[in-house]
Amino acid sequence: SQQGEEDPQALSIQEGENATMNCSYKTSINNLQWYRQNSGRGLVHLILIRSNEREKHSGRLRVTLDTSKKSSSLLITASRAADTASYFCATAANQAGTALIFGKGTTLSVSS
Amino acid sequence: EADIYQTPRYLVIGTGKKITLECSQTMGHDKMYWYQQDPGMELHLIHYSYGVNSTEKGDLSSESTVSRIRTEHFPLTLESARPSHTSQYLCASSEYGRDYEQYFGPGTRLTVT
């Protein structure tokens, strides 16, 4: 069952620019997480935001969560070529023990 | 760097063969997962486990089976591989609870000819 939908599907920017990716979901959540995947590799956890939080920062990453709109955004500031990857949001339901549900991902290309 | 390992990394095999994809983690995590992902596409949960002797099917129907005899080990088996099984298989683990991130292995890219 698909929960998260990322937007846009693909994004191309220049080094130094900011990149914004959005995620919408359908049901109530306990938390929302963002992951990064380099081509052909596993996913790496970036940041987790709980349902009672509105904004969270980690280095060049800023995540916002709007539970009333069931949406989240991931902002990468001052992007670098090394940020080129696919980014996925994943939601954790309120019931303990349930698995994360991943969205379709946004492919980010940062050119130098 | 996550302490979760998958072998083999790449596998090309003929139709009808039995294969086992290995996944092991050294973090003592109770929860483990298998995802299937086609290139550039979303992840689909095919199996998960909450602990030893616990296995559940995920959202995507799969002809594979899993076992969890030891906490650190969660192998996935295909009894008879078919070309439709060609995909990338990702293993992950996490602590039990709702606020924990998942740690992913590097994946196994399977091609069935």
Image (tube, rainbow, N blue to C red):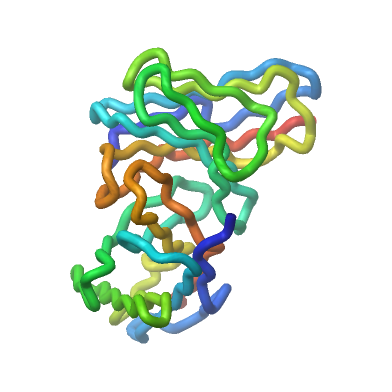
**Which quarter of the figure has residue A78?**
bottom left
Q: Is residue A4 visible?
A: yes
The percent position of residue B9, horizontal first and vertical second, equals 52, 32
The residue lying toward the viewer, choosing from A82 and B91, is B91
Q: Nearer the viewer, residue A94 or A12?
A: A94
Front-lying residue, A55 or A43: A55
Q: Residue at x 57, y 38 (%)?
A: B46
Q: Is residue B81 left or right of residue B107?
A: right
Q: Quadrant of residue B16?
A: top right
Quadrant in the picture for the C terminus of chain A: bottom left
Looking at the image, residue A112 lies above or below residue B97: below
With respect to residue A86, does A61 lie above or below?
A: below
**At x 48% / y 26%, what residue is drawn?**
B55
Instruction: Give the residue furthest to the top.
Output: B69
In depth, the one of A97 and B34 nearer the eye is A97
The residue shown at (63%, 52%) is B39
- Give the percent coordinates (x, y) of residue A24: 47, 74
- Find residue B59 and report its horizontal and vertical position in percent: 58, 45
Quarter in which the N terminus of chain A is drawn: bottom right
Is residue A75 something that shows in the picture? no
